[in-house]
Image (cartoon, rainbow, N blue to C red):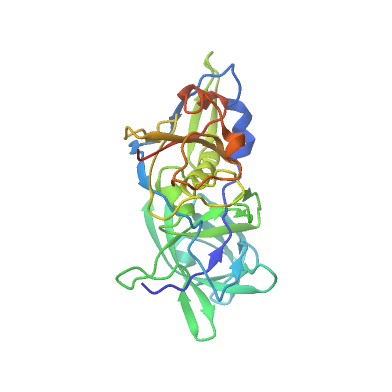
Amino acid sequence: MSRHVLVIALVIAAAGTAHADWYTGSNFSWYGRIFGPRVPLAGRDLNGIAMNGLVLDGRSVSHVSLRGGALNGVALTELELEATSLRGRAGRRRVSGAALAGAELDAPLVGGGAVRLRIDDIARRGRQDLRYLVSYRTTGGWAPLCGTDASGAPVGALPLAGRWDERGAHVDDADAFTFACSGFVLAHCVDAGYAPWREGMVCARRGRCQRITLAAHHQACTRMMRADYCGDGTSHTVDHTPVNAYDALGVRVDSEAWAFEAEWDEDGARCLVNERLAGVVPACAAALVDPDCGDPARAADGALIFSEVEP
């Protein structure tokens, strides 16, 4: 498979932390539901170690800028991202969706400089799920940002609000978004059910309820998929290792009678019972020992995702 890989820092929508305290504490029972049509997903999946699948001459891209773009030679202004829909103004004209084909955007490089990106086409996978075919400028022309698949077709990407730092933590940046390549952890966690723009309801024992987004769950998913137990950006797994993940909101259900691994939140593992790979013990393992690890009731204390590994 031909790859023109461009490493882009991760970007997560910014609402997760703001809601965390609502469902943290012993006076809450975890009761949740997701708005809109939903079919619960089986928990079994394959993990991965790469947050995103993009590399350009060994240099990494910190984010994609929402400022300074152009469409057919006309400056793009007021560019914003809602869910996965980019929209803005080209001159006096409002543009969004397929009308943005041909738009060029700047992606700053870590350490200085920038690369020019071009939106070539846009495909809709769902009401709020647009996938973009994006190229980057090279000295010899334009190359697919996310590489190509086995048939030689360009791999799509979806835009996620904000950016990620070198430790895998989301940074709320109103001027930035990240193109997440399909098949890698950022996009994979959206496909796993944790689209950061989706909303659910969490209710207290006495019936007090509050809407939350799944932004925190998406961030927790990126930690879980990469076995980033310590929350420092270090992966402790290898690609395609089976993992069974589920949550108390019912986005994903426990589909396997496997050995319990860990509880997860935005910062990594909250506690750990079994490492995903035999003999691969994270430096923070001693601090994660908790005899109650895995109790579903602990969702009321902030556990967002639970994971299991094959016995």
- Name the outermost residue toward the bottom: 140
Look at the image and tell me whether residue 254 can be seen: yes
Front residue of 268/54: it is: 268
What residue is at 58 percent from the left and 57 percent from the top?
177
Quick check: 231 above or below 153? above
Residue 46: x and y in percent read 37, 49
**Nearest to the observer: residue 93 or residue 65:** 65
**Relative height, residue 205 to residue 167 (above, below):** above
Farthest-out residue, left: 151
* 106 shown above or below 9: below
- Which image quadrant for residue 109? bottom right
In the rendered view, would you say 234 is above or below 269? Answer: below
Q: Residue at x 59, y 16 (%)?
A: 27
Give the image location of residue 167, x and y in percent: 62, 52
Specify the farthest residue to the right: 112
- Number of marks: 0
Quadrant where the image shows the N terminus:
bottom left
Q: Is residue 213 left or right of residue 172?
A: left
Outermost residue on the front side: it is 279
Residue 143, image x, y percentages: 46, 77
- Give the image location of residue 100, x and y in percent: 49, 66
- Quarter of the image with the C terminus is top left
Q: From this viewpoint, is residue 91 visible? A: no
Task: Kindly identify the residue that appears in the image at 66 percent across and 53 percent down.
Answer: 173
The residue lying at 51 percent from left, 28 percent from top is: 293
Which of the pair 212/96 is nearer the observer?
212
